[in-house]
Amino acid sequence: MAVAPSAVHEERAAGSAQPGAAAFNPHSPPAIEGFTPLSRAREERFQDKFIRKTKENPFVPIGCLGTAGALMYGLRAFKQGKTRQSQMLMRTRIFAQGFTVVAIIVGVAAAALKPKQ
């Protein structure tokens, strides 16, 4: 018994063969009508990015250096057996960490509130 092709199958076959349609290429981005991609800026090196971010929010690196300094000095005092000084420096480290976190939050808030150019 032969089955005649239905109208749905004929529409699908006619719709899939669009004249002028390019074949799918997985190695290139799709062409979207009405969309023009922005050109990429040159790649930014780590040093350039670090300097730019430090200028935007200078308190974050200061807080990081303070945290690392208090930690290293506190560990050295602990190793030498100066427990009181070690405790004070660990508390200083916690303060420096809090300062760094607050600096990050303030920097993010300032960047969010800054009008886009």
Image: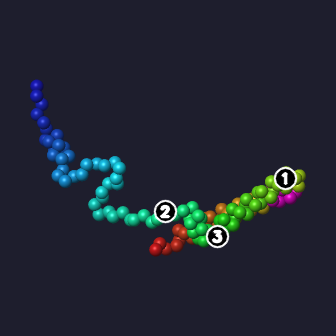
Q: Residue at x 34, y 54 (%)?
A: 29
Q: Nearer the viewer, residue 49 or 59?
A: 49
Q: Secondary structure at mark 1?
A: helix
Looking at the image, is mark 1 or mark 3 earlier in the sequence? 3
Question: Local crowd at mark 2 within 10 Å, few (<14), some, or many (≥20)?
Answer: few
Give the residue type at disc 2: Glu
Inspect the magenta stretch and tell me whether residue 21 lies in it.
no
Q: Is residue 96 left or right of residue 37?
A: right
**Magenta span of residues:** 83-90
Q: Residue at x 52, y 63 (%)?
A: 44
Q: Residue at x 35, y 50 (%)?
A: 27
Looking at the image, is mark 3 or mark 2 earlier in the sequence? 2
Residue position for label 3: 58
Q: Residue at x 46, y 74 (%)?
A: 117
Q: Is residue 28 left or right of residue 111?
A: left
Q: Nearer the viewer, mark 3 or mark 2?
A: 2
Residue 88, quarter of the rendered image? bottom right
Count of numbered labels shown in the rendering: 3
In three-dimensional space, the C-alpha distance between marks 3 and 2, rounded to whole angstroms, equals 23 Å
In the depicted structure, whether residue 11 falls above or below residue 110: above
Check the image and name the residue furthest to the top: 1
Q: Secondary structure at mark 2?
A: loop
Kindly tell me whether residue 96 is visible in this rendering.
no
Q: Secondary structure at mark 3?
A: loop
Q: Which label belongs to residue 43?
A: 2
Looking at the image, is mark 1 or mark 2 earlier in the sequence? 2
Name the quarter where the N terminus is drawn. Answer: top left
Q: Which label belongs to residue 78?
A: 1
Inspect the magenta stretch and tell me whether residue 84 lies in it.
yes
Give the residue type at disc 3: Pro
In three-dimensional space, the C-alpha distance between marks 1 and 3, rounded to whole angstroms, equals 31 Å
